[in-house]
């Protein structure tokens, strides 16, 4: 990269990273080793400090309550849904916020509080599209969809049943429908698995009108998502199949970085919008 990046250094958008796991460490590495992205790391916070002990000490933020002193232009949560409940409104009073653990927003009161806070402060709540290919089209058609549905198929061993009051995932054979109903209801049951459902609801017709179906498929090695949206202006069917890595598809890393870059990178040249 030439002089453009050099001139920008010092005034580059500063990204606060909450959560240094699979996705957070990837986003950190990309921002800190690729100056052409035009971004700086404002801070990295992780609940267990040993995970970030090897990072430059000036980048590590021990107490998330002190985030504003690091002057972030965007805080990205790549940790846990509880971060949004505890700190989301505080972030938005100061700066833009992008939670990846979007299931947190199925709590209607919290969603309202965050949107009202952003409105009052003139800040933005970003919804990263994640696995939802075409979320911008779902959003653009918001007023005319009669129905929006996501059907997700994955192996029961890739579904985290720990928050479900009755199901354990044991003894499932063949294809088994685990949930079929409004997206609002599935989020607290499988918070780590259905962030894409929450993204679809937030970007489209909301948590109560969006329908979520989760099907356990024994022996599957993929995450298979099919989205349908039906309305006067269009019938849309989108399918995305990706290999599994932990609970996240591998494409998740690239997608998360893409959302951060699109939200804040100053860059020149071709831009998808
Ligand atoms: N929106 C999407 O499409 C999408 C896709 C995949 C994952 N996610 C969500 O993103 C988050 C991160 O995913 P991952 O695969 O990197 O997870 P991970 O488990 O690899 O990493 C999470 C990190 O956050 C830390 N952490 C946990 N709770 C914390 C807290 N309260 N405060 C600070 N740090 C905390 C953990 O110590 C860990 O280092 C998860 O909540 C996951 O559900 C969203």
Image (tube, grey):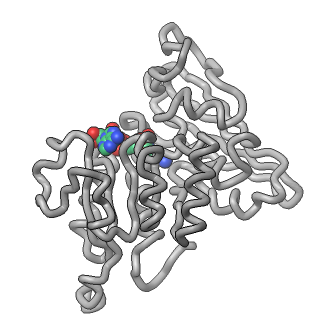
Q: Is residue 174 left or right of residue 41?
A: right
- Is residue 167 found left or right of 38 in the rendered image? right
Of all residues shown, which one is farthest toward the top?
171
- Is residue 15 in sight in this rendering? yes
Q: What residue is shown at x 63% (from left), y 51% (from top)?
A: 112
Of residue 166 and residue 107, the one placed in the foreground of this image is 107
Of 229 and 39, nearer the camera is 39
Q: Where is residue 82 in the image (x, y as percent from the top left)?
A: 43, 40
When the figure is inspected, residue 82 is found, relative to residue 154, above or below; the finding is: below
Would residue 249 be seen by someone viewing this image from the given angle?
Answer: no
Q: In which quarter of the image is the C terminus?
A: bottom right
| Quarter of the image where ligand 1 sits | top left
Q: Where is residue 129 in the image (x, y as percent from the top left)?
A: 54, 55
Q: On the picture, is 42 further left or further right than 106?
A: left
Q: In the rendered picture of this protein, how many numbered marks are placed on residues?
A: 0
User: What residue is drawn where x is 71% and y is 34%?
Assistant: 182
Residue at 14% across / 55% down in the picture? 55
Q: Quadrant of the rendered structure where residue 248 is?
A: top left
The answer to which of 176 and 148 lies nearer the viewer is: 148
Image quarter of residue 246: top left
Q: Position of residue 196 (x, y in %)?
A: 56, 44
Judge left or right: residue 38 versus residue 118: left
Is the N terminus in the top left, top right, bottom left or bottom right quadrant?
A: bottom left
Residue plotted at (38% across, 52% down): 253
Return the x and y of residue 258 as percentages of the image width and height: 43, 63
Give above or below for 243 relative to 155. Answer: below
Q: In the picture, residue 267 is in which quadrant?
A: bottom left
The answer to which of 72 and 241 lies nearer the viewer is 72
Depicted 54 relative to depicted 162: above or below = below
């Amino acid at each position: 990269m030439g002089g453009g990046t050099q001139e920008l250094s010092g005034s580059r958008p500063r990204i606060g990273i909450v959560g240094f796991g699979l996705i957070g460490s990837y986003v950190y590495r990309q921002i800190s080793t690729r100056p052409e992205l035009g971004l700086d790391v404002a801070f990295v916070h992780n609940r267990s400090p040993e995970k970030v002990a090897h990072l430059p000490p000036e980048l590590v933020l021990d107490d998330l309550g002190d985030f504003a002193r690091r002057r972030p232009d965007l805080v990205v949560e790549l940790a846990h849904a509880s971060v949004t409940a505890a700190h989301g409104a505080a972030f938005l009073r100061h700066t833009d916020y992008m939670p990846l653990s979007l299931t947190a927003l199925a709590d209607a009161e919290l969603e309202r509080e965050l949107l009202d806070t952003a409105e009052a402060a003139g800040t933005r709540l970003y919804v990263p599209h994640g696995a939802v290919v075409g979320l911008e089209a779902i959003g653009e058609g918001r007023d005319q969809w009669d129905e929006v549905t996501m059907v997700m198929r994955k192996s029961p061993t890739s579904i985290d049943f720990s928050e479900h009051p009755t199901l354990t995932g044991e003894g499932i054979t063949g294809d088994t429908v685990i949930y079929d109903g409004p997206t609002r209801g599935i989020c607290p049951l499988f918070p780590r698995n259905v962030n894409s459902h929450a993204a679809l609801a937030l970007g489209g017709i909301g948590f109560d009108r969006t329908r979520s179906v989760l099907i356990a498929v024994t022996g599957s090695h993929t995450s298979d998502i099919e989205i349908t949206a039906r309305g006067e202006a269009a019938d849309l069917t989108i399918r995305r199949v990706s290999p599994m890595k932990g609970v996240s598809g591998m494409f998740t890393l690239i997608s998360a970085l893409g959302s951060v870059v699109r939200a804040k990178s100053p860059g020149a040249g071709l831009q998808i919008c």
